[in-house]
Structures are given as structure tokens and as C-alpha cells.
Image (cartoon, grey):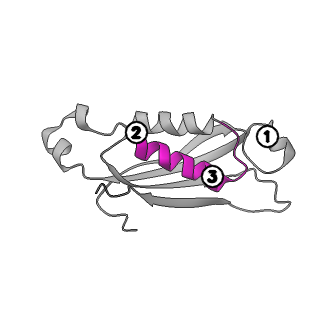
Amino acid sequence: MSLSGDCIFLRGVELVACHGVLPDEKTRSQRFVVDAEVWLDAERYARSDDYQRAVCYGAILDTLVEVAGGPHKCLIETLALSMIEALLRRFWPIDEVRITVHKPEAALGGKFADVGVSLSRRRASQS
């Protein structure tokens, strides 16, 4: 995985949703914080200043919100992978995506500064 090229990112996106393994996490909303990084070639639309060809930050945010509000996921890894797949499906210029899902209120029974997962995936080559 190269994670190279031009990068658009959203950091610290706060989402409230029901995801987790514990029984009450299936019905009790909790806070998740998501960082999204998408790699693409922005050269053509950046040089032409063409918004119509650009990947919109707001559309990325909308996708994250939609996936988080969707069906319950036991694992935050599954949530992150679902976000990646949705972004790759919706925005053809995106080559690679990294999603980090933080679960700041995870029921771990101890003190911690942060807990979460980061997944990265590259668009399958079109042969």
C-alpha cells in the first residue's frame, strides 16, 4: 500500500451511532471520532480550478455520516471498512483511503488516552 499522491483529509469528525460488541451498544448511542484520508490525483481539477471535477469535502463527510448511521456493526474495524468501501464506490477519482475510527468512550474498565483502529485500502485496478 503506497498512500502516495495528493491527499484530502477530514480529521476529528464526531459521529454518534450504535456500534459495538456489548449488548447495550446495540441500542445505546455513543460517540465515535473518525479521521478520513483519501489519496487521488488532484492535478487536473486543481490546475483548472474546476469544482465540478473535484472530490468535495462535504460529500466525504456525508458518506461517513451515512455509513455510521447505517446498520449496527460489532467491530469498529467493520465500520472503518464499510466507510472505505463507500468512499471508493462513490468517488471514482479516489485511489486509496485510510479511515481511523476512535472510540473514546470504549468500555475498557481503565484509563486510556485513545483507542481505535486504522484501515487503509487501495482501489482495485481496472484490468
Query: Residue 94 placed where, x, y %?
Result: 34, 49
Q: Which residue is mark 2?
A: 90
Q: Is residue 96 left or right of residue 18?
A: left
Q: Quadrant of residue 113?
A: bottom right
The amino acid on which the numbered mark 2 sits, given as a three-letter code, is Arg
**In this view, which residue lies farthest toward the front?**
127
Depicted 94 relative to depicted 55: above or below: below
Q: Mark 3, residues whose alpha carbon is within 10 Å: few (<14), some, or many (≥20)?
A: some
The amino acid on which the numbered mark 1 sits, given as a three-letter code, is Lys
Depicted 22 relative to depicted 17: above or below: below
**In this view, which residue lies farthest toward the bottom?**
1
Q: Which residue is mark 1?
A: 26
Query: Which comes sooner in the sequence, label 2 or label 1?
Result: 1
The amino acid on which the numbered mark 3 sits, given as a three-letter code, is Thr
Query: Which comes sooner in the sequence, label 1 or label 3?
Result: 1
Judging from the image, what secondary structure is the residue with disc 2 in? helix
**In this view of the protein, which residue sits in the foreground, 11 or 60?**
60
Q: Which image quadrant: the N terminus?
A: bottom left
